[in-house]
Amino acid sequence: MNRTLSWINPDDPLPPTQLALTPDEGANGLLAAGADLSSTRLIEAYQRGVFPWFSKGEPVLWWTPDPRMVLKIADFKVSKSFSKTLRLACTDPELEIRCDQDFEGVMRACAEARPGQSGTWISDPMIQCYCELHGLGLAHCVTVHRSGQLLGGLYCVAIGKMVFGESMFSRAADGSKLALAALVGWLRSQGGLVIDCQQKTEHLASLGAQEIRRQEFEFIVQDLTRRDTLAWSTAPVSKLDLLRLTHVAP
């Protein structure tokens, strides 16, 4: 029997995650539709492992897939070729990795159309709402620059010691991979444990991300979001964090 998707109003809480649709129902993890993208709602959602994802013309759709793709920091994989890229990056005086520089610009870069895509789910209202989260210290970005040129970056939501990856972009080869590696290396130095990747892609799997059951994911989220907040800073990210990923002594 087909189930009816829950519709929520701004004052309604999100439904229990076990009510989300299943793969057999054609929308793995679709939990609810409606409500708004206020900071309060987004914080509630992320603390429960739920995220918004919808296209232009659709209501806000709330998702909690099962299984869930996560990257455990200790499992991050560096191939031989990427290890060489990291070593070169560490010795390049013109390359700089920055944190929380031009958050809105990073979101807009992630929203740019990509080959084979006709549009983006990162709309102006979503950019505005996540910029509000950034202002609250709950959304962050990492960017990679060489000689002032932006090579790539990413943005994420972070509550306590739980990091929820949102989107990445590249304007040069390995731009987004360098940004992700910088985030992983920095999280290792800060005691970070997990990055939520939402749904499976072969690219993320090649970097060590794995699928886990929703119940396990929610346990991780409940634990890590209650821990002390990570020490985010606008200072340039240390290249030593990258170098350590190559397993080469600095």
Image: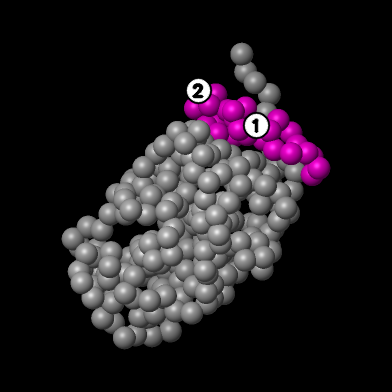
Secondary structure under the numbered disc 1 in the rendered image: loop
Instruction: Write down the region rendered in magenta.
Output: 6-32
Label drawn at residue 24:
2
Q: Is residue 16 magenta?
A: yes
The front one of 128 and 14 is 14
Residue 247: x percent and y percent? 22, 64
Residue 79 shows in this picture:
yes
Residue 171 shows in this picture:
no
Picture residue at 38% right of the left edge, 85% below the top: 147
Picture residue at 55% right of the left edge, 24% below the top: 25
- Residue most toward the top? 1
Residue 192: x percent and y percent? 44, 58
Q: Is residue 77 left or right of residue 219?
A: left
Q: Would you place residue 11 above or below residue 125 in this image?
A: above
The quarter in which the N terminus is drawn is top right
Query: Looking at the picture, which amino acid does disc 1 mark?
Result: Pro
